[in-house]
């Protein structure tokens, strides 16, 4: 097996130790935003539409529902706080892709991929217009995404791509001598401050008349759909003609979806703000979102105050498939990220990380969201974004609203929307399978990206793993 650049060029142990010596375990984005409180639900409420989940998918559903019909009574129930979960702790790459990248979409829906990509761009434009229309302060920057090759065999992957940059050109953009080539896709990705986007969506929803309840975990969905559906919380209930479930990686309120996603933990570091000299030493004046190219990859970006967020690489599945706060504290993964950071930017040695955190990714076997209805069409759901839901959540909201309205739209007729992914097997097969895939991907990254027989078999049955 070969070695990766991150193994060949490890920084000194003392550099890593020093950079992490004073790092808080907590989400930078949530520390960096005002979090208005919403009441918790008590008593009985009647609504036209009830939404479960206060992340992007639920919040976009609320906003889009009111935009479609301002008279509709819309209630949103959140188990904890608005945007505390994936929506408040992600990398903030707001991508146009609805299919977790071109390759995944092309393989699964070759006849639809062109239209899916147009719809994805329209969706991203729609996000930008919404932000402008309501004056949302979400640090939205449409700077595009720069994918970089850091191993010689990866250079060929980019040579024919639009926006190809050779070694000299890519290093002129961002000064890392690990970059051997790249491709800058300028229009299809924006960067946002994730938690600000969540808070601003909630603000707009409330201004449009949506009633938001926090600390209101929905325990049950009652009713078979022949009449209104009731959502039961500890101290109250909401009865609604239609219900949208936007609960992401958390246990589905519908039994049929329990094996459709598994939580995979993703780890993130945030640096202190860079000084002008430090910033000058890395260039990056076009402020693109960056991602390197192996199966196990890093994503990194600048914040408004010129910190660097550096995340990804390890993707950890825990036996049993539970979402648990203790899984977020994994020093081994954070140390690895710090090491890879200084391999990428050795000129920043001495920089400190102020925050480290993790989050659960709602992985589905097709790597992008799937959609459906239950209870005679009165309940709709969207989940399984697999780490690319910041932009796609708005599209998912529209799909849910189309379905709940009983409308056949271009969106609902897409094969991508009509098809469901293959469920994951129950334990112990799930963890054996996920860990075999991880090992095979790691092996491929050490073997010029070549996929072994196991990964090729998964590809063949439509469960192939791609970054
Ligand atoms: C570390 C990390 C980095 C990521 N980076 C990116 C990125 O850069 N770009 C990108 O596109 N995607 C990224 N993602 C994925 C992206 O954040 C998610 O796909 C997206 O936020 C999903 O939004 P959501 O509303 O579906 O889920 P969530 O934000 O998880 O919201 C679901 C909400 O439902 C609530 N809930 C669940 N069950 C109940 C219940 N029974 N009753 C009431 N409330 C309930 C939860 O409390 C939660 O608040 C990342 C994810 C992580 C974890």
Image: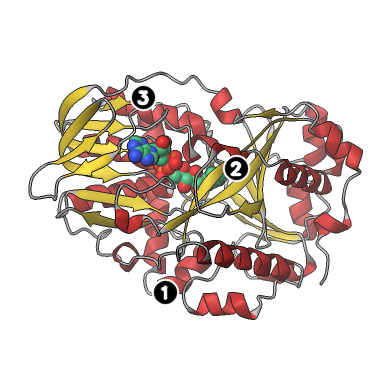
Q: CA distance from mark 3 to mark 1?
A: 39 Å
Q: How many neighbours does mark 3 have within 10 angstroms: few (below 14), some (14-19), or many (20 or more)? A: some
> At x 29% / y 35%, what residue is drawn?
63
Label 2 element class: helix
Task: Tell me where residue 297 appears, x and y as whole percent.
Answer: 67, 56
| Residue for badge 3 | 203
Label 1 element class: loop
Task: Tell me where residue 208 appears, x and y as whole percent.
Answer: 25, 26
Q: CA distance from mark 3 to mark 2?
A: 31 Å
Q: How many neighbours does mark 2 have within 10 angstroms: few (below 14), some (14-19), or many (20 or more)? A: some
Left or right: where 438 falls relative to 5: left
Residue 321 vs residue 3, the one in the foreground: 321
Task: Tell me where residue 236 appears, x and y as whole percent.
Answer: 23, 27
Residue 209 vs residue 314, the one in the foreground: 314
| Residue for badge 2 | 327
**In terms of sequence position, does the residue under pointer 3 or pointer 1 come before the other?**
1
Can residue 117 be seen? yes
Label 3 element class: helix
Q: Which mark is residue 110?
A: 1
Q: Which part of the image, by quadrant, shows the N terminus?
A: bottom right
Left or right: where 173 falls relative to 3: left
**CB-based contact (under 8 Å), mark 3 and mark 1:** no
Q: Which part of the image, by quadrant, shows the C terminus?
A: bottom right
**In terms of sequence position, does the residue under pointer 2 or pointer 1 come before the other?**
1
- Is the shortest distance between ligand 1 and the CB of mark 2 under 8 Å? no
**In terms of sequence position, does the residue under pointer 3 or pointer 2 come before the other?**
3
Q: Quadrant of ligand 1?
A: top left
């Amino acid at each position: 097996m070969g070695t990766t650049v991150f193994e060949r060029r490890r920084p000194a142990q003392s550099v890593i130790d020093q950079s992490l010596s004073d790092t808080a375990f907590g989400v930078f984005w949530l520390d960096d935003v005002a979090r208005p409180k919403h009441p918790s639900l008590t008593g009985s409420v009647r609504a036209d539409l009830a939404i479960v989940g206060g992340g992007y998918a639920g919040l976009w559903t609320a906003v889009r529902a009111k935009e479609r019909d301002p008279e509709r009574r819309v209630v949103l129930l959140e188990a904890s706080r608005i945007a505390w979960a994936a929506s408040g702790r992600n990398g903030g790459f707001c991508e146009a892709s609805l299919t977790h990248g071109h390759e995944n979409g092309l393989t699964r829906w070759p006849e639809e991929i062109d239209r899916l990509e147009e719809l994805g761009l329209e969706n991203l434009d729609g996000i930008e217009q919404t932000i402008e229309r309501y004056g949302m302060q979400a640090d939205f920057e449409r700077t595009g995404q720069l994918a970089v090759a850091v191993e010689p065999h990866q250079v060929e992957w980019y040579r024919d791509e639009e926006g190809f940059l050779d070694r000299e050109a890519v290093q002129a953009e961002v000064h890392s001598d690990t970059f051997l080539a790249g491709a800058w896709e300028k229009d299809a990705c924006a960067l946002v401050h994730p938690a600000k986007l969540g808070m601003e969506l909630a603000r707009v929803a409330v201004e449009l008349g949506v009633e938001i309840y926090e600390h209101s975990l929905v325990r049950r969905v009652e009713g078979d759909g022949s009449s209104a559906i009731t959502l039961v919380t500890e101290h109250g209930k909401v009865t609604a003609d239609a219900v949208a479930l936007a609960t992401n990686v958390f246990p589905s309120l519908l039994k049929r979806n329990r094996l459709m996603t598994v939580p995979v933990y993703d780890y993130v570091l945030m640096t202190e703000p860079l000084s002008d000299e430090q910033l000058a030493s890395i260039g990056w004046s076009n402020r693109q979102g960056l991602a390197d190219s192996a199966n196990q990859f890093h994503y990194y970006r600048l914040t408004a105050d010129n910190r660097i967020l550096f995340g990804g690489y390890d993707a950890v599945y825990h036996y049993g498939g539970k979402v648990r706060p203790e899984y977020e504290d994994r020093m081994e993964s954070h140390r690895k990220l710090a090491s890879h950071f200084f391999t990428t930017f050795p000129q920043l040695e001495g920089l400190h990380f102020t925050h480290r955190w993790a989050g659960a990714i709602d992985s589905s076997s097709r790597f992008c969201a799937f959609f459906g209805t239950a209870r005679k069409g009165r309940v709709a759901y969207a989940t399984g974004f697999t780490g690319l839901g910041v932009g796609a959540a708005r599209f998912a909201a529209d799909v849910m609203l189309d379905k709940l309205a009983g409308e056949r739209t271009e969106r609902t007729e897409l094969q991508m929307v009509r098809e469901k992914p293959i469920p994951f097997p129950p334990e112990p097969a799930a963890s054996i399978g996920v860990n075999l895939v991880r090992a095979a991907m790691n092996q491929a990254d050490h073997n010029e990206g070549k996929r072994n027989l196991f990964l090729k078999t998964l590809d063949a049955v439509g469960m192939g793993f791609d970054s």
